[in-house]
Structure formats: C-alpha cells, structure tokens
Amino acid sequence: MNTKKINRKLEEFDKNYIWHPFTQMKDWIEDTPLIIEKGKGSYLIDIYGRKYLDGISSLWVTVHGHRKKEIDAAVKKQIDKIAHSTLLGLSNVPAILLAEKLIKLAPKGQTKVFYSDSGSTAVEIALKMAFQYWQQKGAEYKNKIKFISLYNAYHGDTIGSVSVGGIDLFHQIYKPLLFDTYKIESPYCYRCSFNKTYPECNLECANYAEEMIKKYADTTAALIVEPIVQGAAGMLVAPDGYLKKIRDICTKYNILMITDEVATGFGRTGKMFACEHEGVSPDIMAVAKGITGGYLPLAATLTTKEVYNAFYGEYKDLKAFFHGHTYTGNPLACAAAIANIDLFKKERTLQKLQPKIKYMTKRLKEFEILNHVGDIRQKGFMVGIELVKDKGTKEPYALEEKIGIKVIKEARKHGLIIRPLGNVIVLMPPLSIKMEELKRLLDIVYVSIKTVTGSSI
Ligand SMILES: Cc1ncc(COP(=O)(O)O)c(C=O)c1O
C-alpha cells in the first residue's frame, strides 16, 4: 500500500475504532482527524509531514520538547534492562533513584513518595491517604471523613477526583455517584463571587474559606486545592497571598492540606512547584503530567513523615495503605522522569524560562485591545485568554457558538496546535520553546482570535 492509501486507512480506522476523550464524536466523525506521527522539539508532525507548533505541550506535559536526546537515551537504556517489574513486594532501581530526587526537589516536609500512573490516581491516593490518616491517628479524629474542595476545581476523572471537582459541565451528571464535599468559592477574580476587586477585597474568598473550615473542621480530613492556578476551569490565577492564607487556615484548624500540582508542577508556573511562589508546604501533594517530561504515564503522591507514621505499625494491626496500581513505579517511566529532572539543572531550564515568561506577559498585553478578549490570565507558562461576547457586561459566548473551537481551528490553519477550555484559549507551550517559536505562537493566536471574533481592532 502506498503512503496515501495508508494515511486514508488510518483516518478511516480512527473514526471506526477510537472513542476520543472529552470529545463529541459526532463532531469528530464529521471532520478529518489530525493524526500525529512524529515530534521534534516544539513541533508535532502529522502523517502527511505537516509541522505544527505544539502550543499545549501535548496536554500540558511536554517540558524539554519532543524527542529530547537525553530522555530518549534514558528510556532506551532502561529498556535494555527491564521494562516493568512490580513495586508490590519488590523494588526497582529507577523508582528508588527517582523517589530520592523528588523528595529533594519537593517543598520541605515531604519525605515519602507513593507512585501511580496518572494525575487522577495521584489525587485518589491523596484523598484515601488523608482519610485513612485520621482514621488511624486516634479515636478522637474518627469523624474527620469529609473534604473541602473548590468550585471550578478539576482534579481528574475518577470518581474520587470528580467528587472533589467543581466544574458542573464535566461533573454534574455523575452527582449520584459522588461523595459529598464541602465546597468553597473559587478565587476567580474576573468573575468574583463576592463582587469585589483585588487587593481591596482583602482576600474575601480566603476569609470565606476560613469561616467554612472553622465550621466544618471537626468533620473534615483535608482541603484539596490546585495551587495558584485552577487549570481546567480556564487558567484561573489566584490572587497573591491566597494560597499561603489557605495553608495557614488549614494548620490553624487542624485539617490536612492537599495540593494538586498535577498541572502546575515541574516548572509550569515558572518555579519547580507552584507552592514555592508563596513558600507553602502541603501535607500531601499530587504530581503527574510533566514528571516524565511528556514521555510516559507516571504520577506520585508525596507526603510528610507525620502522615506516613499513621500507617506504620504491626502487620496484624492492618494499618497499611491498601492501595497500588499494577504499573506503580514502572521502571521505564521512572527512568524517563529521572532524565527529565536532571535536564532542569543541566539546561538551566527554569532560569532560561524567565525571559520567555516576561516576553509572553508583554505580548499578551497587546491582546487586551481586542474587542472580545475579556480577561487574560497568566502564571508563568500557563495562560488563559477568556473570550467574551460583550466586554462591557462580561457576557460569555453561548456554548453553541463554539468560539474556542473556532479559534483553535483557525490557529491550526497557521500551523499551531492549541486546545480551548470552553471560551478560554489556553497557551501552554513546552518550557523549552525557542523565543522565535514563542513569537510565532503568539502572532498566530492573535490573528486567529481577531479573525474568528471579528474584532474591529
Ligand atoms: C490539576 C489536575 N489534577 C488532575 C488532573 C488529572 O490528570 P490525569 O488526566 O493525568 O488523570 C489534571 C488533568 O488535567 C489536572 O489538571
């Protein structure tokens, strides 16, 4: 079969056999699928050899670019030794070495690493860990069985992580399956629930959180939060001081703080972990996505000695953490993660990122004059551009207008791959993107928004 025929077959088989995630398949079937075959640096290359800038780091994971020599080599080297062995009853070399690296990298206080394979599982583990911690800490804490979570939160797609989620569009339908949580307002300044403006608001959202936590502390195991940026809700950036204040409140009322760094971790916000922006150390933290630089599925839930010790005891006391996925601590994935982390130092990734963040901030200012750009949110290399029907009233575009989808389709014509979150255009390029590539990315996004929204500017 010639290449043209193979490509047609791939397109046909895709439509016939794959059910794509977070995708209305009717729209998908009516369109031609873009099928990626290769990658290099900041680019994705499809089966026809067309090159696209990867503007969302292949769903927020790519760190040092595609086909990074050092990570390729680490995976190849490991595959010559062993691809998989279990962490249940055995250990393996890359999992051990990576755990030590993660603990050295993480905010202080983290001492133990529990592996899994996706952001959702890392969160499930965090929730179960927090729950079991209180159950085993002492009879007086037995009622601490609930969680406090935020509106607009996204922590994954498994039932536990959906229970602590707060995006109705994704989560509403599953309500009968979910466990109850106490929900607090999200720090969404553009559409503030308290109708206030930062900094005059004096962090009303955090003050409100304190009231809730105080009220429910006796029955609450933990609060879970995406530190600084609520990603899937549209890159909602919390005002300065919010995270620290929440940490202090959790400590004050004796509930655990779980930070979900799945999206924000590994340099995404300009620091290794978002918590570092406010000197915060959680009791439990979940990491995934960027951990392997976008190579293989791996996740980890880190915690403190205090939490770990509540599980430590005699075999017969049944205090062990009865949780573990088949591919937990997979050696190939851990080898990729070690190479990924080592590159941060070798290539001074975070230092080199700072001027790119500044450039992005400067260029995004230009977008403010566009008629339908309501809000621009940025923390490091996490950007959300919220498009609105009416800038004065902040009226959102209706769902059926598919404005985000139209913008990304326009961008694709110019050779850029991005993916919207509703009416929010998300930009999350690999941290390694070159300045000229970043410039091109922003040029394309600007033109695409302008074309699609018919902005008169
Ligand atoms: C903050 C956060 N937590 C958890 C998840 C779920 O991760 P995964 O898709 O790997 O299960 C995501 C995914 O986008 C996320 O952004």
Image (spheres, helix red, strand yellow):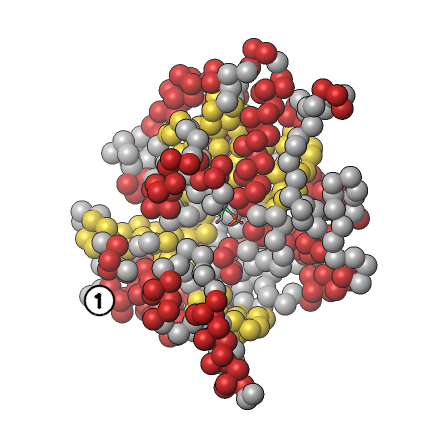
In the rendered picture of this protein, how many numbered marks are placed on residues? 1
Q: Amino acid at mark 1?
A: Gly
Q: Residue furthest bottom?
A: 2
Residue 343 at least partly seen: yes
Q: Residue furthest right?
A: 81
Q: Nearer the viewer, residue 309 or 247?
A: 309
Residue 387 location, x and y as percent? Answer: 28, 55
Which residue is pictured at 69% across the width and 34% down the height?
A: 112
Q: For mark 1, what is the residue?
A: 454
Residue 417 location, x and y as percent? Answer: 44, 67
Give the quadrant of the N terminus.
bottom right
Which residue is pictured at 68% across the width and 23% down the height?
A: 319
Q: Nearer the viewer, residue 251 or 328?
A: 328
Vertical side of 119 occupied by 177: above or below: above
Crowding near the residue tagged with mark 1, few <14, some 14–19, many ≥20 C-alpha atoms within 10 Å:
few
Which residue is pictured at 51% across the width and 26% down the height?
A: 222
Give the quadrant of the C terminus.
bottom left
Classify mark 1: helix, strand or loop.
Answer: loop
Residue 350 location, x and y as percent? Answer: 59, 52
Q: Nearer the viewer, residue 246 or 302?
A: 302
